Image: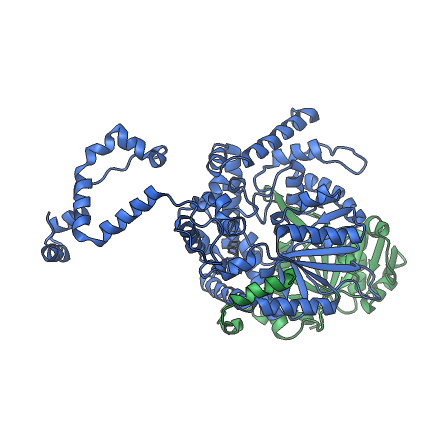
Chain colours: A blue, B green
Amino acid sequence: MSTQTREQMQQQLDQEQHDFSDMQSRHFSVRARMALENEALRKSFRGASDFLMNKRRSVFSDDNALQSLRDRGEAIRQYSLSKLPQLLETLEKNLTANGIQVHWAETATEACEIIHGILADNNARTVVKGKSMVTEEIELNHYLEEKGIECLESDMGEYLVQLAGETPSHIIMPAIHKNTAQIARLMHGRAQSSSGEPVPYTEDVDELIGNARAILREKFEKADAGISGVNMAVANTGTLCLVENEGNGRMTTTVPDLHIAVTGIEKVVEDFSHVPELLTLLTRSATGQKISTYFNMISAPRKAGELDGPQQVHLVLVDNGRSKIFSHPTLKPTLQCIRCGACMNHCPVYARIGGHAYGSTYPGPIGQVVTPQIGGLEKHGDMVSACSLNGACGEACPVRIPLPALIRELRHEANRIPTRDDSAVSGQGVKRSASEALIWRGWALAHSSPWLFRTMMWLLTRSRPLFRTALVTRLLSPWTDSRTTPLPQTKTLHELARAHGVASELKSHNETGAQR
Amino acid sequence: MNSRDRILQRLRSSADAPRPDPLQTPCDWPLPERSEWLALFRQNLSDNHAEVIECDDNNWPELVASVLAEKGVSVLRSGNHAEGRLLVDSVSAMLDAACITGEQSKETLFHQIDAGFSVATAGLAETGSLVIVTGANEPRTLSLVPPLNIVLLRASAMVANFSQLVAQGRMPSPMPTNVLLISGPSKTADIQQTLAYGAHGPKQLVVILVMDI
Ligand code: SF4
């Protein structure tokens, strides 16, 4: 039992919500530092990352099978993207023939307007939402609330996050940053039954879920409309596929009279024969499940004679920067993503700073790649630096997106002299600084001229005492604040090799006639 | 030009040459042996917290009746199919059982039905999944809203996995309104990775496996 009263919990929740908005309004580096200093948060993320990595490993015990499945997954996604415009047209044609209405939105605002328009046409005032990262991306809840439409998240994690007044910190497990005690406080402090009763305080997970279930089932029963995401859209049959465990996705797409599905334009595949392998890769990579509890394939609204299901189904295809990503010669593989979240589970940076520090809908490696391309490097250029290029994300990605290479490319975009190409990432060159450019120019020069390189190395090895001076310590402080100061060796590697009589060294020394 | 045309035009202007058929990329994901299918199917379902009851073509209604009694079900609804009618006939003496032929009010659906009975058209061994093709005689909500879902599957309808089902052309064509793969009761791990069953859908899933082979 908790020693706090409900009022005290509510005060604490208000404080936490305030802290959250405060954190979100700060600069990336400040957010990251705040996250690092929060013990409970670090514990939540460490625990969740370890748990998810182990679960994934346990369902991919045969590495050959895994690698070959990844080859297939990559081939399917690349094939689908290579035919993207045709597939979208086929999808539209078949969905329309099946009775599903298709809408196209170029921007986030246009998507929100379209969705609001459909709701308004049908006089829908209450909406339940299944889990959908695209609707987070376009900030739909906010938009609809301003229009006076209640939009309730029904995925357990999303529901909790919404109740707390926060945003998801992980694309698969939105409330991963909270521990059970925090959720117990949140449910008791803020959740209400339809009659306005608070739910009893409990830290028992089954009871907590049971309480949320009761509240949400009532909402499903009464809601005018359901809004969901889409995991894959099959062009040849005009089918929307949804992957989930809880059943809220099925509730959202089955119980209300109106269903609006929202998806990014990249989620289309050509044929049903491309679905099974992607599904296997998705659930195993995401949560280490052989399959999710439900795989829900929707191809039409309710037909004559059928006893349930929505009367209307709409699909909103959202571009919001994707067609631009599509045109970038190097960054295009970004669109292969099936949103499994494995890259964040395996990222050592994400495990330490958590999802909110990124300040974006999509955190972790895929977030670092997608967000600056959608929202611009001006705003999101800093997160690209939060990567040690260790490569773990690229190894984990089920569709072999070369994430580290894409992050490097974005760093290059951020630091290069702006081109005027159409495909240039917005905010190209914002991180360019004359001094950094000069340092790199010097670095390149030193590495292309043997005598300069040897001179530089000789100087460095002979300047060890300098590294102990206050001036150098201050210069190196971004690195040395939390690390010991690195000291150069007393001799260069070349000198050591020569002293050991390494043949090639003696030879190259004589050939280049180096000074030392 | 409208948004649709602008999006498509941008995509077309930077489309690459089409890639080769991705199904030509070799994939050595192992298919389970036929001899292991049943055991694997059962294991997967029980790992996911579902009950599997083996029976034969004659005794299954009896076995379902005992499940219903044991779980204290007083209202059962089924789709209007041969199996449903058979079951309703054999249990209607002991509880309120019926095949649904008209639309149910949401109030009835959410508050008055204890158990829904559905029939699967196929089973997937690798993942322990039930394939349910919904339609006029197999309502979507019966496997979703009532707290207990009972699904009948004939062992002869088992295949290795989803890929095989699709490759053998056993997905319905044209696709009906809604097809489902169900692999356990509804669940969530959204609170500190602790599994809880009965998130929004059924708390319990009972699979009636008719051993017709
Ligand atoms: S980039 Fe790869 S690993 Fe990351 S979410 Fe997308 S598919 Fe998964």
Percent coordinates x, y for residue A265 in the rendering: 60, 60
Q: In which quarter of the image is residue A196?
A: top right
Percent coordinates x, y for residue A37 in the rendering: 48, 32
Q: Tell me the quarter of the image containing the N terminus of chain B.
A: bottom right
Q: Nearer the viewer, residue A226 or A322?
A: A322
Percent coordinates x, y for residue B180 in the rendering: 70, 62
Q: In which quarter of the image is residue A244?
A: bottom right
Q: Nearer the viewer, residue A112 or B105?
A: A112
Q: Residue at x 58, y 65 (%)?
A: B9
Q: Is residue A272 visible?
A: yes
Q: Can residue A5 be seen in this view?
A: no
Question: In this picture, is A446 found above or below B6?
Answer: above
Q: How many labels does the image show?
A: 0
Question: In this picture, is A176 found above or below A9?
Answer: below
Residue A516 located left or right of residue A90: left
Residue A304 located left or right of residue A267: right
Percent coordinates x, y for residue B174 in the rendering: 72, 73
